[in-house]
Image (spheres, coloured by chain):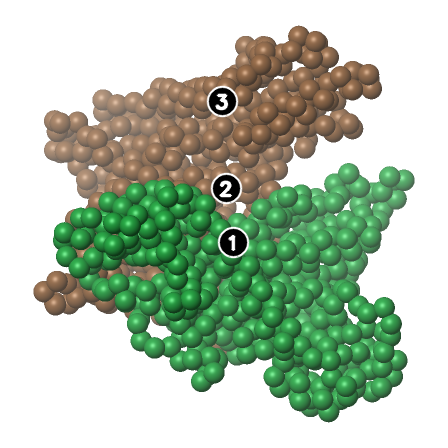
Chain colours: A brown, B green
Amino acid sequence: MSNEKLTTRSENYSEWYNQVIQRAELADYAPVRGCMVIRPHGWALWENIQQSLDRRFKATGHVNAAFPLLIPKSFLEKEKEHVEGFAPELAVVTIGGGEVLEEPLIVRPTSETIIGYMYAKWIKSYRDLPLLINQWGNVVRWEMRTRLFLRTLEFYWQEGHTAHATEKEAKEETLRMLETYTRFAIDDAAVPVIPGRKSATEKFAGAVHSYSIEAMMGDTKALQSGTSHLLGQNFAKAFEIQYLDENNTQQFCWTTSWGLSTRFIGAIIMTHGDDQGLILPPKLAPIQVVIVPIYKNDEEKSKVMPVVERLRLELSDFRIKVDDRSEVTPGFKFNDWEMRGVPLRLEVGPKDVEKESVMAARRDIPGREGKSILPQEQLRGKIADLLTDIHTSLYERARAFRDAHIFDPKNYDELKQIVQEGWAFSWWCGDPACEAKVKEDTKATTRCIPLDQPARNGKCIVCGKDAHEKVYFSKAY
Amino acid sequence: MSNEKLTTRSENYSEWYNQVIQRAELADYAPVRGCMVIRPHGWALWENIQQSLDRRFKATGHVNAAFPLLIPKSFLEKEKEHVEGFAPELAVVTIGGGEVLEEPLIVRPTSETIIGYMYAKWIKSYRDLPLLINQWGNVVRWEMRTRLFLRTLEFYWQEGHTAHATEKEAKEETLRMLETYTRFAIDDAAVPVIPGRKSATEKFAGAVHSYSIEAMMGDTKALQSGTSHLLGQNFAKAFEIQYLDENNTQQFCWTTSWGLSTRFIGAIIMTHGDDQGLILPPKLAPIQVVIVPIYKNDEEKSKVMPVVERLRLELSDFRIKVDDRSEVTPGFKFNDWEMRGVPLRLEVGPKDVEKESVMAARRDIPGREGKSILPQEQLRGKIADLLTDIHTSLYERARAFRDAHIFDPKNYDELKQIVQEGWAFSWWCGDPACEAKVKEDTKATTRCIPLDQPARNGKCIVCGKDAHEKVYFSKAY
């Protein structure tokens, strides 16, 4: 609600990010270290993300369910890599109902183990497969360095968990959900993402392969924005998820898991935001259109407000808000809604009433350039077109920015330069030692090995040995 | 998925309840004592409950947000009654990231304290009021005796938390949400509930007054199905939730909280279910209409399936499912969908194709009486009418059952009899000692003091002293 000037992105990107979140009232710091409160404006954005994803999940045959928050400690220990990956991050309940528990309970950091246990109970025959379940919920990971939305002790997400009869089906599912995240990011959030495979070092603890969508933020750092894991038979063997096949033979299932979290809100903020605040993609914005009535006195008000009310009803297909506050000026309101990222503002004053027009101001194009006078007649269609246009322009702008900051370094020295201000897209032999050297020298990590690869091969940017895949190196959140 | 015969309600009501939940695949036991897994069919029911309530909350000006799962232990201790009520039920995180925490964290049993803390931070002036926030989430209470849906260590619910400038507004809000729950229960769940005030003994720990909706289950026990609390200034004073009024004077807010949980699924099961299984109210049923195609051979199948497909498309406004499984018989399917409580079944066989009709079977009326032959023409309107009719009939049946089991005992001996097989609606002087005596003698408790009261006064059913309110006594879940 503040009209103070924001720290600009070029002054201090990190400070800009924190201020936008606070002033747009997306989230606040909770009294527990590293936890956040997601405020109504932020939660409404998450609800729209949820709806968009949930529709896509259900269209691909998934159903929702709810598994327990508390997991017996011994479950975590059944998959070796999994426990090694998560052990340092656990929150542990040791007391329940006033008594010390015989076996401590873990507040779930992710649910492969407890869902694996239930799947082993439910799955009996090939007829029970595939089992395609998603869960919307909260998880806790004891992170030491936290940032609102990007890395918090508790966060909200969805986690899909599927079991299949064959490796082929599990692979298809893993890539289908990666594609689902990609479509969601591009088509609904206007966030250009690159889907690809994670390196062995960067993969999920317990997965055979992990895939992710990677987005470039406004400071050129990468943000992993969603992940899809092929778990092979690792969890099936740890939890004995087995089925009788058509020949009556006991077989282990092949499983997958995939998740997208409130971290994605960070991706939206840092992909689209500017020095006036948040810019929300129209398809996900809690408020798509705000109408600000403009009048100097009661006479003007009595002319303006009936038109505003008529337009509000006419535009009720959109998520619309009329800002009729009397205690603040129109100028204050403009700044306020710009801070909150509303994609389109309509101003209605006495002159607009006379001329049967409205003034439309696009959030993505500041100042006069983004303004246009629209006739009130058939306004609905024009608003729909404008919102589509804003979506496309946000996407194109972000893609152009990203592409302008991806480079193909000629040698290792160039790579070291490039990852200071962008991404390097380079041949890599696949050796973790080369990856580790880049990280040590530059703090950049491998982000993903994109699914689309050049036909030819090349030489590793680090060691010069033969390489058959290119990878993105960059600093990351 | 089982076609085995259920234990009947008269044989063993409690066993019938557990079997229905398992066989209808609403929920399953989790590996942690007292926790449950809500399976896809159960979760889809909860999603419909959520949508119905969420729409009502938003229509009355509420917005959603998300507050942290973990609460500092010291917060619980700030409101004396609150901590006394919840201390025995807490799950405590004592270890995070491998280190023993300086201050243990409580897994929230309810969120008055942490929300109170944030409200104190956010509310500055009368212009910030009322603050009307709801949260959908999970909570943990360390219950010793658990039952699926009715009482589990972890459960899902919504908790509304509001802050107001005056006591009057807070009272109005408390009763508005009680009325919202009542309308939801009656209009969407077909569960006849009685709204009323809880006694001082039965109220929420920290409230000035608690209100509830009470439903009668099929064994005549009561189930508290939703609660709304007037918290007065108790939490406002404990957490310093203050505002500057129009005269620039610092005032404490008046707050409320209200919640409805997955327990309500238990209310639906035990209000409507019969010896064939679940019966779901049409407005909340995940599947409203199931079509079972009937054929003996491929020739019949080739006649039947195109009609089934056409009807499926025509009825796509409803939540519809075609059961085209080939490995089970139609008879098996009938039992299966009856167990799962689908309100309406349509059968389509070769004769129906010839006669351009379908056989409709109502779940609420078993056997031939519930069956009717409907012409395929304009089927959509007829299905809509039938579903409305099923809703009304479920509601009327439950209300008739309830009213037939509420009695007005003439004396205390009669009361003791009555509460073995129904509810006693009796004058009560308000003395907790009389309430305690009833509980000790019969295990029945006061359920609620209904808002609608007789104009005259009476004599307490226990002590014979003057009484100006009537209360329901009954055994309860």
Badge 3 sits on which subunit?
Answer: A
Separation of disc 2 and disc 1 at Cα?
Answer: 34 Å
Left or right: residue B117 compared with residue B31? right
Residue A402 seen in this snapshot: yes
**Three-letter code, disc 3:** Ala
Locate the C terminus of chain B by quadrant. Answer: bottom right
Separation of disc 2 and disc 3 at Cα?
Answer: 22 Å
Relative image position of residue A302 (x, y in whole percent): 78, 20
Mark 1 and mark 2 in contact (Cβ < 8 Å)? Answer: no
Q: How many neighbours does mark 3 have within 10 angstroms: few (below 14), some (14-19), or many (20 or more)? A: some
Looking at the image, which is closer to me, A109 or B53? B53
**Three-letter code, disc 1:** Thr
Q: In this view, which residue lies farthest toward the left?
A: A247
Q: Residue at x 47, y 83 (%)?
A: B10
Whether callout 1 and callout 3 share a subunit is answered no
Left or right: residue A418 compared with residue B70? left
Badge 2 sits on which subunit?
Answer: A
Mark 3 and mark 2 in contact (Cβ < 8 Å)? Answer: no
Q: In which image quadrant can residue A297 be found?
A: top right
Q: Which residue is mark 2?
A: A46
**Three-letter code, disc 2:** Trp
Q: Which mark is residue A165?
A: none
Q: Which residue is mark 1?
A: B388
